[in-house]
Image (tube, rainbow, N blue to C red):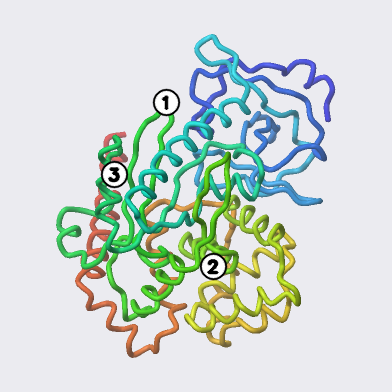
Amino acid sequence: MNKDILKKIRYIPNPIGDSMLSTISPGDGVYIYPKFINKLKVNDIVLYKNKNKLIIHRIVYKSKSKLVTKGDNNIKSDYYIDKKQIIGKVYRLKRDNESIDLENIYLMQSSIYLKEITEIKVIFEKEKINHVFLKGLPLHLHYEKTHPRRLYLDCDVLIGQKDFLKAEKILIKNGYKKEKMALSKTHEKIKNKDVENAYTKIVGGFPVVFDLHLEPAFMMTQLGRLDALYPQKNIDQLTKEFLDTKRKIKINNDFFFILNTEYLILYLVLHLFHHNFRGAFRYDFLDKVIRTVKIHPGGEIWPNIASKINDFQLNNFVYPVFILLKKYYKTPIPRSFLKSIQPSSFYLHYLSSSFKTPFSIFDDQPRVKAGITRFKNLYFLSPEPWWKKIWVFFNPQVIYSVFWVFYRKMKGFFSFLNQKQDH
């Protein structure tokens, strides 16, 4: 670490760019604290040097020998950077002539979020709405034992089918706005099944988002029933079991319903499949859940999870997540468990060929590209026979979505050509 650089850089008045939105906004000043790499943690925001550029990004992955950073607002990560590039850690912002510690920003958002979640939860219980928190702040507080050290996004709640409309009315009555999930008005009309709806409200300057789920969302949320790729009866049964086996946890003298351990691990793994096996913070949290869970005598939790995976034919969807957990996070997953859920050779070939291409669990994808990848993974990893899979292309929602994506791509292409001609 260059001591001369450290002496010069203690405060940067206006970092260039928007890569760290919304944590660091244009006009914010940042205070830098020199910190050696072995003391840095995941979610720390660091200043590092890349050639002749100074970059401020968040650490999203750290092992003994590797470090990955990424801008909160960036799609691509910086991938591996050398420890010697790190200059210091961002610990405070100057905003509107006020000095604010980053930890206080995170704590403030978490406090607002938890207050909102608790208030909605109390109403749900009063109205006897069958619900369970799939992921979100209550689970983070339970497993991490502290508030998130980043701005939190949303809170996923699974609601019983007959209670869904009642739950929606409660959120709207309490100031939440229902977001549009369909691709267009036409798509909304032909959609034959709702999977989830998002509801947003600004509280104390922070967006609070509830995602109400009618089922575990690991398929295509923009599409309805896709029985040609995965049986709806299996999804319905999994939804029922999630709601029937929920358990209580205590956060700040309030009780919250969450999934039991086996189903929680299964859901978080399916959630990663839904996001095309991407998202370092998702892997990081899943690793912590697995490490902190109390393993039953004899370790039968793993055979139980394997039994569910095999019964619901989820092998092809979840196997890569466990492999990636072991590879990057050294998560203690038994070999016997991996062997018991291993897909057939055909699916292993598809997965190995997919992972040979430039791939990073630390990168995000643009919305349209993510949707295309999701459908491709769902199609090729579907446990259904090939003759049945073909029928998905006769599904009106799939046909419409294909044309919608094609239209968007062509529109973008011609817009690019026009801009080129103007220059």
Residue 59 visible (yes or no) = yes
CA gap, disc 3 and disc 2:
27 Å
Tell which of 280 and 243 is nearer to you.
243
Q: Earlier in the sequence, mark 3 or mark 1?
A: 3
Identify the residue under disc 2: 263
- Which class describes the residues within 10 Å of circle 3: few (<14), some (14-19), or many (20+)? some
Mark 3 or 1, which is nearer the eye?
A: 3
Tell which of 236 and 101 is nearer to you.
236
Residue 39 spot, x, y in % from top left:
80, 37
Amino acid type at mark 1: Gly
Residue 189 spot, x, y in % from top left:
15, 60
- Locate the C terminus and report the quarter of the image it occupies: top left
Location of residue 121 (image quadrant)? top left
Residue visible at 50% across and 12% down in the picture: 96
Q: Earlier in the sequence, mark 3 or mark 2?
A: 3
Secondary structure type for disc 1: loop
The furthest residue to the top = 97
Identify the residue under disc 1: 205
Location of residue 49 (image quadrant)? top right
- Which class describes the residues within 10 Å of circle 2: few (<14), some (14-19), or many (20+)? many
Residue visible at 39% across and 78% down in the picture: 234
Identify the residue under disc 3: 170
- Locate the N terminus and report the quarter of the image it occupies: top right
Task: From this view, report whether residue 162 is shown above or below residue 312.
Answer: above
Residue 202 spot, x, y in % from top left:
37, 31
Mark 1 or 2, which is nearer the eye?
A: 2
Residue visible at 57% across and 41% down in the picture: 253
Task: From this view, report whether residue 209 is shown above or below residue 182.
Answer: above
Q: Earlier in the sequence, mark 1 or mark 2?
A: 1
Amino acid type at mark 2: Tyr
CA gap, disc 3 and disc 1:
22 Å
Task: From this view, report whether residue 54 is shown above or below residue 247.
Answer: above
